[in-house]
Amino acid sequence: MLLGPSQPCVLRVSSDAPVVPKAAEPLACRHRPQPRQHKSCAQNPQTHQKSSKRSVRMATSTTDRQAPPAPVIEGTSKAEQLQEPASIAYTPEWQELLEHRKEIEKTHLRDLLRREERSDALFHEYNGIVADFSRQRVTQKTIELLGKLAKRANLQEKIAGMFSGEHLNVTEDRAVLHVALRARREQKIVVEGKDVVPEVWEVLDKIKDFSERVRSGEWKGATGKPLKDVVAIGIGGSFLGPLFVHTALRTDQSAAHEAGKRNLRFLANVDPVDVARALNGLSQETTLVVVVSKTFTTAETMLNARTVRTWLTSELGPDAVAKHMVAVSTNSKLVTEFGIDPNNAFGFWDWVGGRYSVCSAVGVLPLALQYGWPVVEKFLAGANNMDEHFRTSKFEDNIPLWLGLTSVWNVSFLGYAARAILPYCQALSKLAPHIQQVSMESNGKGVDLAGRRLPFESGEIDFGEPGTNGQHSFYQLIHQGRVIPCEFIGTVKSQQSVYLKGEVVSNHDELMCNFFAQADALANGKTPVELRAENVPDHLIPHKSFTGNRPSVSILMPDLSAFSVGQLLAMYEHRVAVQGMVWGINSFDQWGVELGKVLASKVRTSMNSARTVHRRIKPSDGFNYSTTRLLNTYLAGKTQLLYPEPEDVFPCDLIDSAVCRPPTSYV
Ligand code: F6P
C-alpha cells in the first residue's frame, strides 16, 4: 500500500472533534491495598515476571527512549508501571496521527479519487477477493503513519503470538487459537510443547463419521425412522456464526443440492415464541437435537435444552434422548449430567472463544449434518486460506490487517463511532448480526490489557442489512445525516440467476449497480453548483445537497461458495483482532456480559419466591423502586392468565392448532 505524494488540500470540510486521549483513570481494583487483588483484577502477564515472551517484548517497548512517559497510574508502584507499556495513545505515533488528521480534514474524497496512482495503491487483491480502500479518507501519509502505529503496537509479533498459542487472553489466561480449528491436517501448531492439530482432526473425523451415519439413515431415531431435521440449540457464539454460514450456504446450488430435503433450524432465544418457531411442524420421530454450549451452563440454552428434551421424551419416552440428542461443549461432565451419552458429545477447547467457534464442532456439526462433510471441508479450507494470507502476507498487502488499521483510523482519529456492514448479497443477511458479536463483544472494552481505563473509546457500533433493502431504510442518515463508514460487500457471480429477456440487466446486475453507485454517492456527494446546473429551485438546494466525503471500503468476491464464506469469516475475525491489538485491549474476553446475568439470577430467585407464597415484591427484596414496581405489575398481570399447569406446556404448533397449549385465556 504505497501511494504517490499527497496532494494539496482542496476543500475544507467540517468534521467531528478529534479524539484526544483523556488522562488514564485507575481501575477500582488498583486502589485496593492487597497485592493479591491487583493480580486477580487482570491476571496480566505483563505484571508477572513468570509471564511469556509477549510481556518481555511489550516491556521493551516502554523503555524505548522515544516514547513519552507513561501516565501515572494510581495504586501501582513505579516498578509495576515500568513493566506496563503506556497506552498506545501516549506514543508519538498516535500523536502524529492526531496531527495528521488536520491535514485529512482539508481533503475531500471527490478529489482524492481523481488520483490514479492512489487508487492503484489502495486496491488490494488476494486469491480472488478484492478490497478497495480508495474511498477511505486516507493519503499515502496516513498509510505510512498507520504502519508506524502498527509497528509501535508490535502488531506483527502479536499476530505471530496468536498463531503460536501465546496466552493473548490474559484475563482468562488462555491461548487464542481458533485458527487451529481450520488448520490443514498436515499443519503443525505447537502449544506448550503439544501439537494441537491432531486433536482438532480427531473431532472433525468424529463429526464426519457421525454426520454421514445420520445423513445416510444408518443412525435411526427411537422409532426406527431416519433423522432428517436438526434443531441446534445455542446462543451468542454458539448460534450467530453457524446461522451466518447456514444462511450463506442454503442458496448455494451445490450446498443446497447436498442438503436435499433436510432441515436445519436454530433455537437461541429463551422466548417461548422462538421455541414455537423452531419446533413448528417438526415431528419428534425425525428430529435430532444438538445442544451447543461451550460452558453448558448458559441459562437460556439449558432451559431451552430441557424444554426440547421434554418435548422429545413426552412423545418418545426417556430412552429417546440417546438417539435424539447430542451435544457440543467443552464441559463433558455437565453434558453427561444432563443425560447425553458422552459418546454423542463433540468437544472443543478453552482456547476457542465462543464468538470465534464457528469452525469448531459448534458450527461444523450442524453444518455437516445439513450439507455433508465435503461442503464443510471447503468452508474450513476457505477460512484456512485467509488465515495463511493474514499470517504470511507482507504488511502492505495484508487485507485483514488494513481493514483493521483503517477501522482504527476511522474510530480513533476521525471519530466515527459506528460502522455499517452492507452486503449486496441476500445470502449474507446474517453477516452483520454475527459480526456485531465478533466485533462488539471483542472490542467494546473499557480498560487495556493491564487493567487501566482506556484513554479513548475502543470498538465500534456495528449494524447492517443487505443492499438494496438498507437503501430503502437507513441510507438517508448515512448520506445526509451522520457519517458512518460503510462496508460494501458484493460478488461477481450470484448464487442464483434471474434474467428476463428484454430487461436491460439481470437482477444481479441491478443489485450490483447499486453496490458501485452507493460507494461513489457517499464519497462524491452532490454540490449546490451541480444542483443549480440541473435547475433545482433555490429553496430545495440545501435539502438536495450531499456533503459527500463519507468513507467506505468495497469488498468484491468472485462468488459466494463454501470456500469464500470461510475466507470472509476469517477476514472479519482477523480484522477485529488487529483493532484490539493496536488498541492494546483484550479482544478475547467478555466480562461485560456478566453483570446482567447475575442480576437476572437474583430476579429469578425473588420472582419464584414471591409467586410461590403469593406475595408482592417488597423493598426488602433489594430492588430499587422502579424495578419493584415493574416486577409487581408483571406478576399481577401473570396471575390473570390461566395455564393448564402443572402439566408440561408446549408452544402452540403454528400449523396444527389442536395441540396448541399456550395460556388459554385471561381469567
Ligand atoms: O453472552 C456471553 C457468552 O458467553 C458469549 O460469549 C457466548 O458466545 C455465549 O454467551 C454462549 O455461551 P455458551 O456457548 O457457553 O453457552
Image (cartoon, helix red, strand yellow):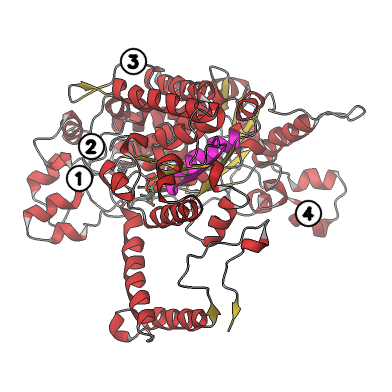
Q: Residues within 10 Å of mark 2 (few under 14, many from 20)?
A: some
Looking at the image, which is closer to me, 656 or 208?
A: 656
Of badges 3 and 1, nearer the viewer stands: 3
Give the crowd class for mark 3: few <14, some 14-19, many >=20 residues within 10 Å: few
- Alpha carbon distance from label 2 to label 4: 50 Å
Residue, disc 1: 70
Vertical arrangement, residue 147 with respect to residue 333, above or below: above
Asked if the beta carbon under badge 4 is closer than 8 A to the nearest atom of ligand 1, the reply is no
Q: Residue beneath label 2, please?
A: 67
In x, y percent, where is residue 524?
68, 39
Of residues 207 and 160, which is closer to you in this image?
207
Q: CA distance from mark 1 to mark 2?
A: 8 Å
Task: Give the image location of residue 607, x and y in percent.
Answer: 37, 76
- Asked if the residue under mark 1 is in contact with the one under mark 3, i.e. CB atoms within 8 Å, the reply is no
Residue on which the image places disc 3 = 187
Point 47% across, 58% down: residue = 270
For label 1, the SS is: loop
Asked if the residue at label 3 sits under 8 Å from ligand 1, the reply is: no
The kind of residue tagged 3 is Gln
- The answer to whether the residues at label 1 and label 2 have Cβ atoms under 8 Å apart is yes
